[in-house]
Image (cartoon, grey):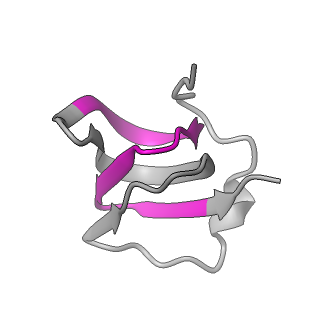
Amino acid sequence: RAAWKNELSDPAIFEKYLTHPFNNINAENLERNLYCLNCEEIRFKNEKGTIFIARGSGEMILPAKIGVLIKGGKSRVTERP
């Protein structure tokens, strides 16, 4: 089961990323890595609605079929190896 970690393993991954007012990450049929830095709200969603809300900085393995709406801060999604 995926778990949100309230810290980043490497904050330097955001050096070239800009802060955005909102970032919508659509649900996909594969796991991905999610990284967030100084975000006001990180809303995890499935087809039924919101399942979890986090704030601040952190990372997790984003499960398949879960989307995310991020308010403020910086965010990044990468494919898993």
Q: What secondary structure characterizes most of the magenta part?
A: strand
Could you say which is closer to the camera, residue 28 or residue 19? 28
Query: Which residue occupies the extreme front position in the image?
Result: 29
Residue at the right extreme of this rendering: 81
Q: Residue furthest left?
A: 49
- 25 to the left or right of 76: left
Q: 69 or 65: nearer the eye?
A: 65
Q: Which corner quadrant holds the N terminus?
A: top right
The image quadrant of residue 79 is bottom right
15 magenta-colored: no
x then y, percent, for residue 38: 42, 51
Residue drawn at 48 percent across, 61 percent down: 75
Q: Range of the magenta residues?
A: 51-77
The residue located at (47%, 56%) in the rendering is: 28
In percent of the image, x 73 and y 61: which residue is there? 12
Q: Residue at x 55, y 23 (%)?
A: 3
Residue 24 occupies quadrant: bottom left
Q: Total of numbered circles in the picture?
A: 0
Horizontal and vertical percent position of residue 6:
53, 29
Q: Tell me if 79 is positioned left or right of 28 in this view.
A: right
Q: Position of residue 31 (x, y in %)?
A: 61, 46
In the image, 56 versus 35, the foreground residue is 35
Q: Position of residue 70 (x, y in %)?
A: 31, 56
Q: Picture quarter containing residue 5?
A: top right
